[in-house]
Image: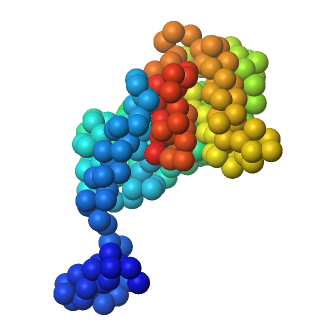
């Protein structure tokens, strides 16, 4: 055991803690935050992933240090807790939520859901959310999931996104705020196939082609990058990264 972990173990003993627990080193955390601020690409905002920081005081500490109120969320009960704790938080769903789950959330959860942007990955889901907004008599903010190489879902090419944007015109209560891309595959590409740098450049170029389909008022959220790639984006189409 290293001296560092021996020190942590001794601290737990002195505190009378003799059970599994999570220990957070605030000094190292603050050092990582400083590194993010130093290396983050110019003009990029940070969107914090609440499922990775599922502790409200921890989320508050990092958000304050990075000067951000942007949160990526995944699970409605956690979304509700974040909305109620942070009055200025702006949430983007990092996965599509089934429309019935969205309906239940919007009609039963006590929070300001106007601060949430819902993720749309197919024409069918777009139609479902359009009908939901009409049924509830409310406006819903949406972003489109775009596929930049990971192939986990979303609109496969700019032409598909353009068709969805045309279909959006029929849904008067839906407001497009932008797109979300995820390129977790890029760091895993072997050098034989060009390596991570080439894959990341290709993903960024694909994202730019999707963004070009959006109108001037549909570009508030141009999200790309996960924790492994967030600090590698410089000068692309994105205006925010997630970590």
Of residues 46 and 89, the one drawn nearer to the viewer in this rendering: 46
Can the viewer see residue 236 in this picture? yes
Residue 229 position by quadrant:
top right
Which colour scheme appears in the figure?
rainbow
The percent position of residue 102, horizontal first and vertical second, equals: 53, 43
- Examine the rendering and report whether any part of residue 165 can be seen: no
x then y, percent, for residue 130? 60, 27
Query: Where residue 166 sits in the image (x, y, percent)?
Result: 68, 14
Q: Count numbered badges in the picture.
A: 0
**In the figure, residue 13 lies in which quadrant?**
bottom left
Outermost residue to the left: 14
Taking the spot 19% from the left edge, 84% from the top edge, the residue there is 15
Single out the residue that lies furthest toward the right. Answer: 192
The image shows residue 91, relative to residue 60, as above or below, that is above
Which residue shows up at 61% across the image and 39% down it?
Answer: 182
Residue closest to the eye, 230 or 60: 230
184 left or right, relative to 218 = right
Tell me what residue is drawn at x 33 percent, y 79 percent. Answer: 3
Q: Residue at x 50, y 39 (%)?
A: 230
The answer to whether 38 is drawn above or below residue 218 in the figure is below
Is 135 or 76 nearer to us in this picture? 76
**Quarter of the rendering containing residue 200:** top right
> If the image is split into quadrants, where does the N terminus sit?
bottom left
Horizontal placement of 121 versus 132: left or right?
A: right
């Amino acid at each position: 055991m290293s001296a560092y972990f021996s020190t942590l173990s001794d601290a737990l003993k002195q505190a009378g803690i003799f059970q599994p627990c999570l220990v957070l080193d605030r000094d190292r955390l603050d050092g990582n935050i400083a590194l993010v601020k130093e290396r983050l690409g110019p003009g990029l905002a940070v969107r914090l992933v609440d499922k990775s920081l599922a502790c409200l005081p921890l989320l508050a500490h990092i958000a304050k240090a990075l000067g951000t109120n942007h949160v990526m969320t995944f699970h409605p009960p956690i979304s509700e807790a974040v909305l109620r704790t942070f009055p200025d938080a702006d949430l983007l769903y990092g996965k599509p939520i089934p429309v019935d789950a969205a309906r239940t959330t919007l009609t039963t959860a006590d929070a300001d859901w106007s601060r949430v942007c819902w993720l749309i990955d197919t024409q069918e889901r777009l139609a479902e959310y359009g009908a939901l907004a009409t049924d509830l008599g409310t406006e819903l903010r949406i972003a489109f999931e775009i596929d930049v190489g990971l192939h986990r879902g979303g609109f496969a090419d700019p032409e598909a996104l353009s068709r969805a944007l045309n279909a959006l015109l029929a849904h008067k209560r839906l407001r497009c705020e932008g797109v979300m891309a995820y390129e977790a595959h890029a760091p895993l590409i072997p050098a034989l196939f060009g390596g991570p740098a080439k894959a990341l450049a290709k993903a960024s170029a694909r994202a730019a082609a999707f963004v070009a389909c959006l109108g001037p008022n549909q570009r508030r959220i141009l999200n790309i990058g996960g924790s492994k790639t967030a600090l590698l984006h410089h000068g692309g189409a994105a205006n925010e990264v997630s970590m």
